[in-house]
Structure formats: C-alpha cells, structure tokens
Image (spheres, rainbow, N blue to C red):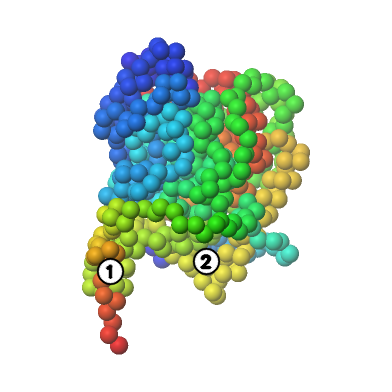
C-alpha cells in the first residue's frame, strides 16, 4: 500500500504546477446558509429500537469497553 | 414472459394502468429472475410481494425498483457493501427511495456496489464482485455496478444509484444502459450513506432515456432533512425531441484525446456525426483545467470521506470487534470492518487535511475545483452541452486494475469534471466496440435536465442501440 499511495500522490501533485493565485476555493457548489428552526420538542426514535442496532447496550445506553489505560 | 421483459419501466407502468398487466405478476417475474442471478448483482431481495402494494393508478404503477445498497431502507439490511455494516437494519428510509415508493415503485432488492461507493469496477465490495452481463469475465463498472448489471441483464426494469465522481454514468456506460447524475442539490441525500457530501448525488440507471426522466421526476425536490437539497428545481418533463436543430455540442480535446482507446473514439466520432445529421452543431471547446479533475477529486473526495467515515466506530450500530480497551476496540473494528480501498482513501484524506499539508493539497484542490467550474461556465457561453465519451475504455477484465489504483481512478477521468462542477450529466449507449457497449456523455448547465434529456432522447432514437447482452 505505501507504493500505491506514493503513485497516487505523485499524480495529485500535478496540481502544484498550476497558478492558482487569487482563485477562490470551492467547498460546495451550492451557496449554503445556516438554517435555524424553532427549538420545539418532537418525537424521536424509540430508544429500544435504536439500541437494537447497537453491538452492545446496557440499561438505557450504548455500552463501550473501558477506556482503560490507567496512568 | 420474454415479451414482458422487453418492456421499459414506463411501458410496463402504462400497461398496468391500462389493466393489461398485473403489477404483482410483474414483480414476481423480476423477483424470480433476480433470485436466480448469477452475476452477483443483488445483496438482498424482497422475499415475497412488496410490503405495501402500490396503487395501480400511481405514476409508477407498481413497476419494481432495484436500489443500490447505499440507500437506507427501514428494517431492510443496508451495508453499503461493507463488512462494518453487516446485518445493519436502518431505522428510516432514504428520501429518494421513499419518494419513488410513494410514486408507485416498490423496492425489489438492494444491489451490490463498491464498498461505500469507492471504486470503478465493483471489485471493492466486501460481498464479492459483480460480473458484466455482456461478458462475465469483465467488470460492470462502479460503484453502482450491481444496479447497472441488474438493469442490463433484465433482472430489474430500472434502478437507482449514486454518483460522486461517475458512479452512475461509468457503470451505465460499461453495461450499455442509460445513467443520469442530476444537478447537485436536485435530489435529497437524506438516508444515502455519505461518501463525499459535497459531490454525492442520487440518480436513475435505466434502459432508456424516458425511463431516466420518469424516475428522476419522482426523486427530485426540497427535503427539510437535507439542507443542500434545493427548493423546487422545476418539474422533469418526459423527453420528446427527435431533432437537434440549433443546439451546439462542445467537444473538449482534453477529455477526448489521450487515454481514450481507439474503439471508444470510433463510436464517439460516429456519435458526433449523428448529432450533425440531426441538425445539431459540433465544435471544439476547451476545458483547460479538466485534465486536473482526477487530481483534485482524489484530494477532495477522500478528505470528505475521511471525516464522514469517522462515524463507524463500533459503538452505535454495525460491526464491533472487541479487543481489550476502548481505543483498541475502535482500531480493531475499523481494521476488520473496512476494505483496502476504503482504508486507502481514509489515509489519503487525513493526509491531505493534516496541518502541514492542508494548503498544498486540500486548499489547492478546492481552487482547482473553482477553475473547473469556471471552465464549464465559459464553455456554456458558447455551447449548449459538453459531449464526451463516458469512459475512456470499454469494460475491463476482472482483476485487470485491482493492483494499480491510479489506473482504476483514471477510468473516471471523463465523468469527474461534471461532478466537481455540480452540473448534470447523462450517459447513453451509442454503439459497440468489439462487442462491448460504449457510452457517450452529455453534460449540461445546472438545472437544465429537461434540455439534456431531450437531447439524449433525440440521440437515442438516432443511435438505435438495440444491443442486449447475449
């Protein structure tokens, strides 16, 4: 994989030859504006159904292994 | 039975509405064909009749739809062809799938794809490759390879897929069918598992241009669940044009010269002659920065992917490989869950976004994206459409490019520029080269899908592509 990544990066680096002075970057082709909505309570997903998808659940939440790493 | 298979989606819907064809019978016909599929096109199939029988007077009248496995469907296994989502059953349905179901197209099954839509051959699926129905030793293209192969082989009347850099158009081209990527923002991305959010768009893969228009009509529109979906992009009309008088097609030398194999160029040149026979004009128009499209794309798309795929961490859904403490659980889960190409792109993306390299890679690539958009804008002052081959080659052999990711990436060199510019493009089959289909691509200004579909319709009639796999 390191060799493949180098080949890809060599190809990508061709853009370093371009004169891009003063060119605005495009992060998105659609002009996005922040959208706010009223902060009103509304029904959410049923907790049991959401937890059904979890690899491990405990009580009412997702279970994760201990962060461990005692200092 | 073979008579039913010959019907396009629109024709089948028409027959059902006229009471000449039973929607349940059509669904079962396709379900049985898909169940016997030996191409590897499907990852999941509806077991019986559709859960909610569509009304026969609905626009799509119950004609079944194959759905790329990147679209969430409530309660239906949805994996994006990744091990990391094995067994996942989403809580909700993607807006595009929901709208098509509401318009009367029930889901027939979920189709195979490159893992997380990363690939151009469908060989990156964790669940095995898809074979091209024209030649089973060859790839169907990707990433929507299962959808394209299913439609081409008559395992589904029509399908939907997603296109980030060519993932609808390139497989459509390699399988001899029609594939359309809409203007960015035309179709809601809600419920589409995210790859590169500023590029991803859903669209149809169909047997003909009319079917593509019909499906697209029922996919588009503002969705409060996707802030990038645009208000009322305008109704999609069914195309009717037979001539191309007054229309100018620009052919960019940058995308039609070096790298395009002779057999593809031959079909493309014949297609240019057909445009002129139909009264249209063909002229050279330069897209000088399009040659840098692949470079910019393989910075921007992996950068966005590296952020989007951070959510797969073994905590809330999908795979968990437990191996001691929390950090090693994350690491083992992602190592076991992601395939090589996904890992490659996450590494490329995080590298391009890292503090010492951000400006040299991500910053520059965003500026190249601006230049590519400006090239199209300049071209569209002179011409109505940009016309190129869809793929520089016909379908390649399974395994031919898996050892050389860059050569795989270059198979999207003709499709990536329109993705970066966010403009619509359609691929339609124009002929055969050595018995394999060759697609041509029409790209158009943002939100001119109706004019693009009309031009494609006129060309489709003139090409008379009747090819079907043996």
Q: Is residue B289 above or below residue B7?
A: below
Q: Nearer the viewer, residue B105 or B458?
A: B105
Q: CA distance from mark 1 to mark 2?
A: 31 Å
Q: Nearer the viewer, residue B192 or B341?
A: B192
- The quadrant in which the N terminus of chain B is found is top left
Q: Is residue B298 above or below residue B57?
A: below
Name the chain letter of the residue that bears numbered label 2. B
Q: Are marks 1 and 2 on the same chain?
A: no
User: Which residue is pictured at 29% across the width and 76% down the height?
Assistant: A67
Tell me, yes or no, if residue B353 can be seen here.
yes
Q: Position of residue B439 (x, y in %)?
A: 53, 33
* Residue indicated by mark 2: B352
Q: Position of residue B294 (x, y in %)?
A: 55, 53
User: Which residue is pictured at 60% across the width and 59% down the height?
Assistant: A34
Please say if the residues under marks 1 and 2 sit with CB atoms less than 8 Å apart.
Answer: no
Which one is in front in this view, the residue at disc 1 or the one at disc 2?
1
Q: Is residue B371 above or below residue B411?
A: below
Q: Position of residue B110 (x, y in %)?
A: 35, 39
């Amino acid at each position: 994989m390191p060799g493949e990544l180098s080949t890809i990066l060599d190809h990508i680096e061709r853009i370093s030859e371009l004169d891009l002075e003063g060119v605005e970057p495009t992060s998105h082709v659609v002009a996005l504006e922040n959208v706010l909505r009223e902060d009103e309570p509304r029904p959410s997903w049923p907790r049991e159904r959401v937890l059904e998808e979890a690899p491990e659940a405990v009580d009412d939440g997702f279970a994760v292994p201990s962060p461990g790493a005692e200092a | 039975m073979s008579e039913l298979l010959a019907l396009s989606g629109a024709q089948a819907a028409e027959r059902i509405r006229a009471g000449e064809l039973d929607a349940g019978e059509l669904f079962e016909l396709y379900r049985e064909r898909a169940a016997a599929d030996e191409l590897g096109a499907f990852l999941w199939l509806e077991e019986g009749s559709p859960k909610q029988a569509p009304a026969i007077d609905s626009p799509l009248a119950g004609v079944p739809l194959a759905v790329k496995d990147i679209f969430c469907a409530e309660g239906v296994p949805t994996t994006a062809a990744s091990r990391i989502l094995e067994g996942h059953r989403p809580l909700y349905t993607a807006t595009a799938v929901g709208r098509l179901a509401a318009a009367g197209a029930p889901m027939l099954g979920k189709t195979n794809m490159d893992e997380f839509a990363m690939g151009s051959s469908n060989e990156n699926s964790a669940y095995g490759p898809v074979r091209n129905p024209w030649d089973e030793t060859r790839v169907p293209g990707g990433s929507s390879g299962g959808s394209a192969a299913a439609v081409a082989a008559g395992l589904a009347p029509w399908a939907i897929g997603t296109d980030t850099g060519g993932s609808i158009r390139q497989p459509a081209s390699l399988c001899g069918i029609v594939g359309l990527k809409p203007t960015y923002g035309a179709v809601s991305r809600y419920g589409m598992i995210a790859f590169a959010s500023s590029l991803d768009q859903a669209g149809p893969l169909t047997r003909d241009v009319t079917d593509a228009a019909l499906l697209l009509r029922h996919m588009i529109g503002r969705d409060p669940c996707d802030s990038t979906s645009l208000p009322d992009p305008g109704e999609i009309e069914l195309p009717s044009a037979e001539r191309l008088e007054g229309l100018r097609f620009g052919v960019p030398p940058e995308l039609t010269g070096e790298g395009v194999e002779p057999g593809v160029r031959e079909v493309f040149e014949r297609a240019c002659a057909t445009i002129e026979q139909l009264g249209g004009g063909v002229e050279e128009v330069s897209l000088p920065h399009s040659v840098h499209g692949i470079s910019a794309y393989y910075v921007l798309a992996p950068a966005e992917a590296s952020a989007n795929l951070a959510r797969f961490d073994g905590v809330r859904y999908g795979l968990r490989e437990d191996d001691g403490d929390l950090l090693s659980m994350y690491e083992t889960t992602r190592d076991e869950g992601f395939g090589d190409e996904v890992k490659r792109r996450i590494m490329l993306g995080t590298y391009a976004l890292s503090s010492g390299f951000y400006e040299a890679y991500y910053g520059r690539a965003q500026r190249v994206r601006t230049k590519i958009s400006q090239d199209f804008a300049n071209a569209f002052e002179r011409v109505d459409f940009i016309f190129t081959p869809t793929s520089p080659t016909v379908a390649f052999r399974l395994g031919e490019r898996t050892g050389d990711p860059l050569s795989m990436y270059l198979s999207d060199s003709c499709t990536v520029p329109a993705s970066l510019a966010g403009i619509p493009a359609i691929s339609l089959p124009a002929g055969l080269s050595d018995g394999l289909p060759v697609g041509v691509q029409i790209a158009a200004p943002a939100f001119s899908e109706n004019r693009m579909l009309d031009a494609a319709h006129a060309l489709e009639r003139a090409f008379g592509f009747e090819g079907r796999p043996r």
